[in-house]
Amino acid sequence: MDAGDLLNEDEEIRDTVMEAAKIKADSMVRIFGHIGADAVNVGEKDLALGVPFLKELEKKYNFPFVSANLTDAEGTPVFKRYIIKDVAGKKVGIFGLMGDMSEMVDKVQNATGGTVKVQDALEAAAAVVAELSGKTDYMIVLAHQKANRDWVLARRVEGIDLIIGGQDYLKTENPKRAGETLMVNSGEKGQYQGLLEVTLNGEKTAQNSLIPFGDKIGDDPEVKAMVAEYNDKIVALYGSGPDTTGASVAAPAVLRVASCEPCHSEVVRKWRSTDHAKAYSTLVGKSKQFDPSCLVCHTTRFEKSAGFTMSRQQPELMNVQCESCHGDATEHLSSMKPIPVADPPVELCIECHTPDRCPGFDREFDEAWMKIAH
């Protein structure tokens, strides 16, 4: 099961990368169907792909999207409100919820152009629990909302056995408990598989495990083949640009940073010795040099003004160059106007050096800064 935002990481998808985002989402639905996903809640980032597209995936793969409180303008549920699974002789009810706080409602509105409404989460949950009363032995909610709202849900709606949260990307070693309701989270970006083992014969017991997907777990051959097929589709989509094989990284290319060199030769010399100067090359060979989710941190000003674009694949804007941190330097280079960001804040760094990619980066920032200080 998944609590939402499984298929997409961005609240807004630019037109230039929408096709790639849909190819990725299609591949993920296919893979999750293959490994036996029982229910997937719909998050606001999933909705950025477009409701018609999600409905196509639902039909194409018979995929188990669920949401009890996402409706159209007439109040009709957009997805299945719940499903009931037979597990080891027990009936397990599973339904999805979207948080109904104003911030989340606004995100759904923006993602769908106002075509999808978020109904009251507590009322929707109470309605499903009442409808399934006596028909299930165990009730699970996939909750895409702030973790504090999971506590409210657990205390206000009786009859929920388990809440799996996802919107806050928390990681729960031991289940939290509110009355008779357990609450768990399994981190983000597929780094862990959460496994809750429940005993229902007699007194209910539960034991939670978080299984890290590290190098010790081998690749499933069929899933690996599906990932390779996805990579091939992305290469075919964007590979007609200047770089089709990654060879342009090694070939002579006048990088944008060369424009800075006449006045900042020492800074550029130091930059060439850093990992920032090799950022793009780390993607080559992994079939990731055309993946927008990777290029956003491995190129200069990805899909921004005067930045690297998927359509053009500019070799001169590969790697993390000066303008990645200091902003568009077009006017600075043409008329010596001040650069937009003279002193980049650490918040800019952690947009790419996120906890999942660089654990402890915020605590070790001073050490990291010394590698690129100029």
Image: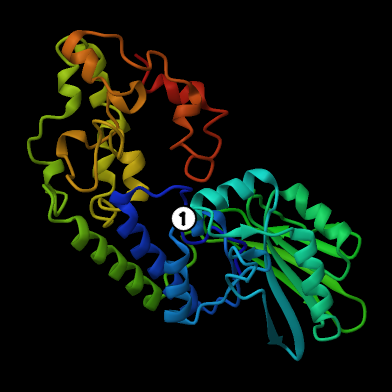
Q: Residue furthest left?
A: 252
Which image quadrant: the N terminus? bottom right
Residue 332 picture quarter? top left
Left or right position of 15 against 12 = left
| Residue 27: x %, y % from top left | 38, 69
Would residue 67 be found to the left or right of residue 324 on screen? right
Residue 236 locus on image (x, y percent): 19, 63
- Quadrant position of residue 93: bottom right
* Residue named by callout 1: 48
Depth order, front residue of 136/367: 136
Name the image colouring: rainbow
The C terminus - image quarter = top left
Q: Give the percent coordinates (x, y) of residue 35.
A: 50, 77
Residue shown at the point (63%, 68%) measured from the top left: 67
At 56% from the left and 48% from the top, the residue drawn is 107
Q: Nearer the viewer, residue 208 or 119?
A: 119
**Is residue 127 rendered to the left or right of residue 271?**
right
Q: Residue at x 76, y 86 (%)?
A: 91
As displayed, is residue 271 above or below residue 241? above
Question: Farthest front residue?
Answer: 74
Between residue 219 and residue 60, name the one nearer to us. Answer: 60
The residue carrying pointer 1 sits among few (fewer than 14), some (14 to 19) or many (20 or more) residues within 10 Å by Cα, namely many
Q: Position of residue 80 (x, y in %)?
A: 62, 76
Q: Against 7, is 34 above or below? A: below
Give the answer, above or below, for where 125 lies relative to 313: below
Instruction: Look at label 1 and name its amino acid.
Output: Ala
